[in-house]
Each structure stands twice: as structure tokens, then as C-alpha cells.
Image (cartoon, rainbow, N blue to C red):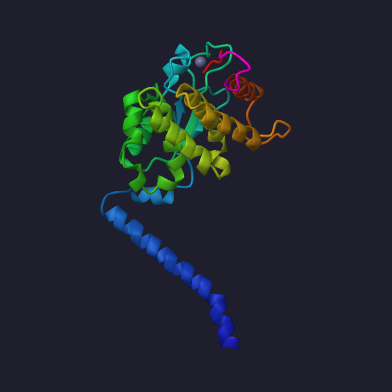
């Protein structure tokens, strides 16, 4: 009996050790093949850069649109008085902008991290629309950071493609809404809901927009407070949009 007991006690550890060996073997092969740098394995817990992102939409003010694609190292975000904008947003109701965190282990992203580090004490790095699209069209799914960055990549892709391929953005925002499960991704949820509702309205898909707004209201009950819950303004946006969709109000809703 004792032998049996020992066996069951030890088995989980053996399995864990074997699992680790397999994982290390896999990373070793990836390093040898030049697909990842060894350093990525030892420093993959956190976020290596943030990108400020506004949706590609004509309703965004000049200041916010002019700050789109700015890249920041985490140390910069932590500074007192930090703002991702070049100036002050010019709209009475601020434009929707999000700081998206990435580990970024695939070649295109790694290049951006390196540029941002080299520029840390200088003017900083700002990616154009083309560079942002090149970033998310890179081989990110093949990289060691695929799981860490998946939702952020979809969020960047969705924001970049709003004007040139709305279907891509709708799919991306939907994906984010479905897949947000970890606390670190919660900040993506409200922006994804707001943008998706707008794009569905623009597509004339009123039923889907209404269903989404119902889901938003159920997800964020107005009497509750929580991490990254919508602001009163954001709730009001959704309420106005719903009212319009139900035919109670003319559409006069900003982006
Ligand atoms: Zn603005």
C-alpha cells in the first residue's frame, strides 16, 4: 500500500517535470531556428511596450488622430502626469483612445520595441497606419508572445481597419468581447463594445447592434461598479444609441 501511495503522490510532479522538458525542448528548437531570442523566454511576464490607438475614423479630433500609433515603454507610462497625446483632445466629449500593451516577440514588433528603447530619451517612436497594419499582419501567431498578445493584436487590427475594411474590425471587436477573461484585458472590453455598436449601426445591422447593447447593459449593470467599467458618458452613448435604434430618437450621436 505504501508503494502505491508514493506513486500517486509523486506522479503529478513527474508529469510536470516532463511537461517542462517538452516546453524547454520546444523553445530550444525555436531559438536554434532563429524564430525567437533566448531573452524572450526569460522576460515574457510583462508588457514591453504600449501603443496609443484611436480608431481610424473621421470623427476623431486632430490632436488624438495625430497621436495615434505613439509607442511608449512601460516606465514612461508610470511617470507622473503622463499623457499619450501631443496636446489636449479638442472634442467636448473626449475621443475614444486606448493604450494597448504588447509583449511583441515577433520580428515586426521586436523591431518596434528596439526602436522605442533606442528613442526612449529622445522624441519617441510613432507608427503610421501602414506600420500598424504591418505590425498586426506580421507572424505574431508564430511567436512566443502569441497568447499574451492575442487580444491586443485583434484590438489594434480592429482600430486600424475601421475605414478600409469594416468587416475585419467587426470580427476583431467581437473576438475581443468573446475572449476577454483575464483582468489585464478588461480595459479592452468597453472600447470594443462601443466601437462594435457603432460599426454595426453604420452597417445597418440594427438587430445585432441592439443585441450587443443589451449584452453590454447586462455585462455592466448600471448599479454596479467595477474595474474598467464604463463611465457615465459611455453608458449614455449606448443608451442614446439604443433609443435611436428603437426609433425613439433621431441619430445625433458622435463617434
Ligand atoms: Zn480628441
Q: Position of residue 253 (x, y in %)?
A: 56, 15
Region of the chain picked out in magenta, as a range: 245-251
Q: What residue is drawn where x is 31% and y is 38%? A: 138
Give above or below for 14 relative to 236.
below
112 and 152: which is toward the camera: 152
Q: Is residue 139 magenta?
A: no
Q: Position of residue 28 (x, y in %)?
A: 32, 58
* Quadrant where the image shows the N terminus: bottom right
Give above or below for 165 relative to 113.
above
254 and 143: which is toward the camera: 254
Q: Is residue 247 magenta?
A: yes
Q: How many marks?
A: 0
248 to the left or right of 108: right
Q: What residue is drawn where x is 39% and y is 22%? A: 163
Residue that lies at the very extreme toward the bottom in this rendered image: 1
Residue 95 shows in this picture: yes
234 and 103: which is toward the camera: 234
Q: What residue is drawn where x is 46% and y is 22%? A: 202
193 to the left or right of 126: right
Give above or below for 36 relative to 121.
below
Query: Residue 226 is drawn in which quadrant?
Result: top right
Name the magenta segment's main secondary structure. Answer: loop
168 to the left or right of 82: left
Amino acid at each position: 500500500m505504501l508503494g502505491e501511495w508514493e506513486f500517486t503522490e509523486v506522479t503529478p510532479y513527474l508529469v510536470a517535470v516532463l511537461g517542462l522538458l517538452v516546453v524547454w525542448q520546444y523553445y530550444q528548437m525555436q531559438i536554434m531556428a532563429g524564430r525567437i531570442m533566448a531573452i524572450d523566454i526569460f522576460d515574457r511576464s510583462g508588457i514591453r511596450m504600449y501603443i496609443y490607438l484611436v480608431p481610424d475614423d473621421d470623427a476623431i479630433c486632430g490632436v488624438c488622430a495625430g497621436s495615434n500609433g505613439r509607442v511608449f515603454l512601460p516606465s514612461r507610462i508610470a511617470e507622473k502626469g503622463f499623457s499619450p497625446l501631443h496636446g489636449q483632445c479638442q472634442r467636448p466629449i473626449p475621443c475614444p483612445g486606448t493604450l494597448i500593451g504588447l509583449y511583441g516577440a515577433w520580428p515586426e514588433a521586436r523591431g518596434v520595441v528596439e526602436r522605442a528603447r533606442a528613442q526612449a530619451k529622445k522624441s519617441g517612436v510613432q507608427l503610421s497606419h501602414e506600420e500598424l497594419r504591418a505590425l498586426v499582419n506580421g507572424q505574431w501567431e508564430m511567436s512566443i508572445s502569441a497568447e499574451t498578445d492575442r487580444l491586443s493584436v485583434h484590438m489594434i487590427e480592429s482600430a486600424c481597419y475601421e475605414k478600409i475594411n469594416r468587416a475585419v474590425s467587426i470580427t476583431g471587436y467581437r473576438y475581443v468581447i468573446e475572449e476577454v477573461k483575464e483582468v489585464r484585458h478588461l480595459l479592452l472590453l468597453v472600447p470594443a463594445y462601443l466601437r462594435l455598436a457603432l460599426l454595426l449601426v453604420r452597417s445597418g445591422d440594427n438587430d445585432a447592434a441592439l443585441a450587443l447593447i443589451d449584452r453590454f447593459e447586462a455585462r455592466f449593470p448600471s448599479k454596479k461598479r467595477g474595474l474598467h467599467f464604463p463611465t457615465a458618458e459611455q453608458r449614455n452613448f449606448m443608451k442614446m444609441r439604443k433609443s435611436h435604434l428603437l426609433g425613439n430618437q433621431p441619430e445625433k450621436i458622435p463617434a
